Structures are given as structure tokens and as C-alpha cells.
Image: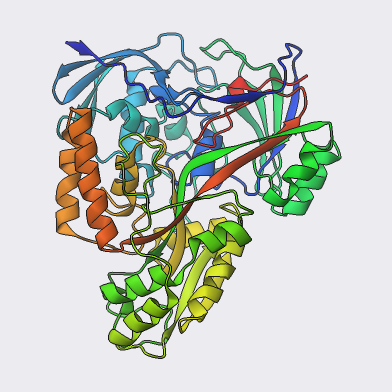
Amino acid sequence: MKKHLLVLSLAAAVAFGSVSVQAKTFTWTASTDALSMDPYSTNNSFTNSFMNNVYEGLVRFNEKMEIEPALAESWQTTSPTVWRFKLRRNVKFHNGEAMTADDVVFSWQRVQSPGSISKLNLGDVKDVRKVDAFTVDVETKAPFPLLANELLNLTIMSKAWCEANNAKEASDLKEKKENHANRNTNGTGPFMLKSREIDVKTVMVANPTWWDKPKHNLTEVNFTPIKSDATRTSSLLSGALDATVNVPLQDVQRINSSGAFSVVQGPELRTIFLGMDQFRDELLYSDVKGKNPFKDLRIRKALYQAIDVEGIKRSVMRGVSWPAGMTVAPALNGAPLGQNTRLLPFNPDASKKLLAEAGYPDGFTVGLQCPNDRYVYDEQICLAIISMLGRVGIKITPQIEPVAKWNIRLNAQDVSLYMIGHAGLPMADAYAVLFDTAATRSKTQGGLNSGGYSNPAFDAMLPKIASELDPAKRKALIGEAVAIERADIAYIPLHQQPITWASKKGVELRQAPDNQLRLWLVTAP
């Protein structure tokens, strides 16, 4: 049997401030709230990050983006498609119940329920079986070297608690079907939910029986979402907050010059891009009737060449972004070399010519679906794109809305032209981006392929990538898949956005390129 030790060295963590051992309350903010306390009901990155402080998986990432044991203390392969995980024996849920293999098997079964979004990120897993009270076997559909990374999507819930509270199935946000787990928690993680006021305040307290040795010194954590950029910054500078993970770029200099606060920045693994409805015969939000312009490659190329990503970097992102030529961030594990340059140059004249050739010399009208509180300057980026597309004759009907509504829209494929981002998380691998956003959408794949892009040649690459054990061959296969997607203009890549955090001096945070605040590593004076 071969023991697996999977390590991703994407970036070193950035720590700032000094360490203090005196326990205290920590107050922080972001631009949006977690969408649900049910870890299976959404694939929203901020929600996943937030809930990883409450629920845990068999493995986890540390701040250096390295896989390390969590609820499983070790694992081995017993065959090319079966991994055996040995569970820790001293793990308790927040209500005091012991965690066993029954909870792991139940969690796998729950993640397959109709409302679950997490199942789309576990498409390579065939089954999870109990061996004994503290051993489980995970079987994959084919040899899959990144299983440990994929299992980051399977956080463990209590079988007894879910059954007692009529929460055996995941909350279905798309159908607006909630259950007890949507607003209440019972995890194994370092923090326990104390109170929850949606979009107002969430309070967590340190778990005194956590299996791991705490590196934090926090007794209570208060999270208050603040949508307004100006209000977040003023609240920080007033001393009402200890930290924020959404610093407006225009406020960086002001915060750094205050003397009492520190800012840390770095590129995120997330690429921001535009998607297009490529599966309907007629667009939902357009004046074009009886056909779908986005099914025509010339139209997709026309949009691509009408958008000036360098102009967005200069005028919207204040010079702090990394223009992208593919949806896969180059820092992700497995990302191909040489494909992050723009496939087509910014050229409005070429765009107009393509529109005319496709039968739209005067352009057309289409809706643009964008969040206004999800990505860095998301609304401003969309407004800039509206202006750019207008210059070539594509008239935009803006549909700019809060992330909760936008997220439901994406899941329901209620889109025509839309903004989306992906960081390859939680796997931190290029395969995750391709599998989620470009695989032909089904019950088991393409969960974020809201535009319905489909290419059989691309789909045929995915199982090859998933099962290839040789890293060099695997990267070459990923490169082939990315080339297919790029040539199809499946998406219009914009940029990798920056991570910008700030805190009071004396607070120690650890920033990694996954943009996850790991509260179990935070110390405050």
C-alpha cells in the first residue's frame, strides 16, 4: 500500500502584526454575509471559507495551501481506486457527540441529496463505505490522484443531529427550501455558532473541546457584513473593527498612512470572466427573437475583442489586477504555461466587422447579470464593460444585484451574459475550474456552467486529466483542454483580482491566495 502525502505549494502565507497570547474577542467584516449555515447548500467561496471555521473535512489546507490531516489522521490506497482513511478517535461535535465513521458515511449520503450543490464538486467519488467505527473507504470512479483535494468539499456533519432536526437532506436554496441546518450548526471545527442574524451579525465562540491544539487566542468572534465600501473603511479606522477582508483599493493608502492599521495585498487564485448563454435557442434577456447570437463563434469573438482588459485594470482596478488569457489562474496547480496571454487583441473595429458578418450590423440588446457585492469592484467592472460593448453596438440591459440573488440566478441558469469568477477552490487545482465551469452541465458536473457551454472534445479530456498520475502528462492534458475552451471562446477572461485585507496593528492574520480567513490562526492583542 502506498501512502499519499499531497502537497500544494502555491504561495507562502503572509503574516503581519505581532503575536499575543491574551485571549479576546475578535471583530471582523466582509462585503457580504455567508449565504447559508448548511455547508452543502452553496458553492459560494466566501460561504465555504466562513463555514470552514465551523465544519471540517477529513483533510484541510493550511495557510501555505498544503494538504494536511484533519478529521482523518492518515490515509492509504488499498487499490488504484480505493483510499482508506483512519479517523481521529478524540473528535466531538459541538453538542458533545463523538464523531465516527457513521457520520462520514451519512455526510456522503447527505451531500447527494437534491438540494446539495457540493455534490457537483465530488463527481470523481463513487462511494464512501464504513470499514469499522474509525475507518472509511472512499472509492473513486477511476484512479484519481487529487482525491484528498477533492474531499475538501466533504465537510462532516452529525448523523444523529441531522436526523433529530429533520435535516437529513441539504437545504435547497434554489427552491427556497430551508431546514434546521440552514440557520443552525453542529460541526467539529474550532468555532461554534452562538447566534445568527442574517445580514446583520453572526457570533461564534471558541470550541473548548476542539481536537486540534489552538494557535489562536480568540474566545469570541463577531462577524458583521458591511456592504458599503466607505462604511467598512470608516468602521475599521474608528476602531470598531479589528479586521476587514474587503478593503476598497481606493482606501489602501489612507489605511496604511493611519499609523494604527496595516494592509496586505496579493494576487488571488480567482479569475474573473464573462459567461454567455450558449444552450438556449433564444436568449432570455434580448431583443433578438427566434435565435441565440451567442451560439455563433463570431459573436463571442466580437464581445471578446470589444472589451479592453488593460483599460479595466487602469481605470477601474487602480492598476492592481492581473489581466488573464484563460479562466485558470497561472498559480493554480496544473495550470498550463503559455496560455495566459489574450487569445484576441482588443480591437473594436474587428468586433464591429464580426458583428456585421454574423448578421448584426447594428448590434443587438442583451441583459448583463452581475453581482454588486461579490468580487472586487464587480459593479464598476460591469459598468465599464457596458460602455465598451455599447461602442460596438451591443446595447446592455444591466441586471446588477446582491450576491444572494445573483447566486440563485446562476444556479437556475437564469442568465444571458453574466459575470462569474472561480479560484479553483477548494481543490486549488486547474481541474476544478474546468470541471465546474466548462464541463457539459449535468447532475454530476458543470455546476457553475450556467451558460451551458458544451464541447464533447473538451468533456473527453476531463477523465484523462482526473486519472493521470504523472504530473507532467497531467499538465499537458490540462493544456489541451484549456486550448479547446479558449478556441471556443467558452468564456471571456478578464483578470485575477487582488486580495486586500487590513487589520489593527498587533493583530496577526495569515493571508493565502485562496482568500480564506482561517480564524484558528488569528491572534489579537
| Residue, far bottom | 362
> Looking at the image, which residue is at 37% across and 90% down?
361
Whole-percent x, y for residue 148 in the image: 32, 26
Q: Looking at the rendering, in which quadrant would you find the N terminus?
A: top left
Q: Looking at the rendering, in which quadrant would you find the C terminus?
A: top right
> Looking at the image, which residue is at 83% across and 37% down?
240
User: Is residue 282 in sight in this rendering?
Assistant: yes
> Looking at the image, which residue is at 74% across and 15% down?
23
Give left or right: position of 204 versus 443.
right
Whole-percent x, y for residue 362 in the image: 41, 90
Give left or right: position of 128 versus 432.
left
> Looking at the image, which residue is at 80% across and 44% down?
254
User: Is residue 180 in sight in this rendering?
Assistant: no
Whole-percent x, y for residue 460 in the image: 14, 49
The quarter of the picture where residue 336 lies is top left
> What colour-coding does the image apply?
rainbow
Total marks in image: 0
Question: Height in image: 186 above or below 288?
Answer: above
Give left or right: position of 223 versus 66.
right
The residue lying toward the viewer, choosing from 386 and 414, is: 386
Whole-percent x, y for residue 225 in the image: 68, 46
The residue lying toward the viewer, choosing from 267 and 177, is: 267
